[in-house]
Amino acid sequence: MSRSDTRTVALFCKDVAKTFVIENEKNVWRLMLGLPVVGKTFKALRDVSMAVPKGKIVAILGHNGAGKSTLLRILGGVYQPTEGVISSDGTISGLFEMGGTGGRQLTGRAYALRYFSLMGVPKKERKALLEDIRDFSELGDNFERPIYTYSTGMGARLYFATATALRHDIYLIDELLSVGDEHFQAKCWVRMRGLLLNGASGVLVTHDWVSALKLCEQSHILSRGHLSAPGPTDEMVVKYLDLPRPSGEKVHFSATNPTLYHATSGEDARLQFNMQIVEETPVSLVYSIEMLRVGIGWEVLLLGSSPLQAHLPGIYQVELSIDTLPLAPGEYSLNVGLIKPKGGANEETEAFDARGWTTGNGYRLVVNGAPTGGAAPPYCP
């Protein structure tokens, strides 16, 4: 990396590979002597390169067995890479293999104190942090009891509360925002959202694409040890899920349409799209304007449809009109679709073509100007 890159990147790895030895007695001695191993090996990661910008969490999407947890443990220093380099700028908290700092004979309080000791937390700061962990984990009197008496959910609450009580620069997260019941999961999301809004960086490895959409602007896909190039999370989720798109055979948007549109807050917006009707059919335009809110997900701010646009074959320009645009300055996802309107109560809507984050080909809308009364804010912490 260049010197300028190091000021904007929190975590970086280049050409990282990890090979596991299928051990036998001979290879144990060869490993101890620093000699090349012989026999069977398994290459879990191959030529993995990625950069995590400061203040951002990057998702790594992958199915079970893709190598996600291996990569996270290499980034956290639990495993050493067989090849490649890793660098980080800041303190790291690994939200994986929770409970690794102490035995289950420890009480919840003793576990947290051991964690503080390992992290070098001054003794004068520990009392307030202990109360925070006790309150957040909702363990009550169980906080003073041995961990071996806890249920799996209670242990997960203790470990998550402890790992996030301290402010770290970088968080490595492995599916852990799904711990506990819905109430506690919501608390986890709120806490992680607060950490992000205060400038934390990190990596989320998951097969839960909803979590990636909630937390991450950029994502990779990991498959059989190979990491894809980064891309906007909505586009990467579509690739990961292999979601179908409308064929566009009868009606489709023009490929010459811009992907970026502009409007002014509080003024009438007139957004124009070119479309082509190939086979005679009635066509209407539907739209939504959405924003990704960190820790929440995609939020629909405006939603609507325009009346019949055309029905005969030909090339047309359709217009989306929004009077007194009620959006604050910011960047939004502009999702539009061409559909066949219902002709009756028993007739289903047919989708001809779509541009949106759910199809990985959405348009963007940049709203300029000063915020006006009633405008939806770009972010509500």
Image (cartoon, rainbow, N blue to C red):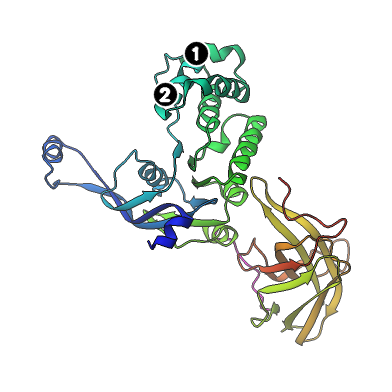
Question: Quick check: 86 left or right of 23?
Answer: right
Across and down, in percent, residue 45 comes to 33, 52
Q: Given the image, on which type of amino acid does mark 1 rest? A: Thr
Label 1 sits on a secondary structure element that is helix
Quadrant, the C terminus: top right
Numbered range of the magenta stretch: 241-249
Kind of residue at badge 2 = Ser
Which one is in front, 187 or 287? 187
- Residue 164 percent across, percent down from the top left: 54, 33
| Residue in view at x 57 percent, y 57 percent | 233
100 or 358, nearer to the observer: 100
Residue under numbered circle 1: 149
Specify whether residue 129 is in view.
yes
How packed mark 1 is, by other alpha carbons closer than 10 Å (few <14, some 14-19, many 20 or more), is few
Front-lying residue, 14 or 205? 14
Horizontal relation, residue 138 to residue 4: left or right: right
Dominant secondary structure (helix, strand or loop) of the stretch shown in magenta = loop
- The residue singled out by tag 2 in the image is 117
State the residue lying farthest toward the bottom: 314
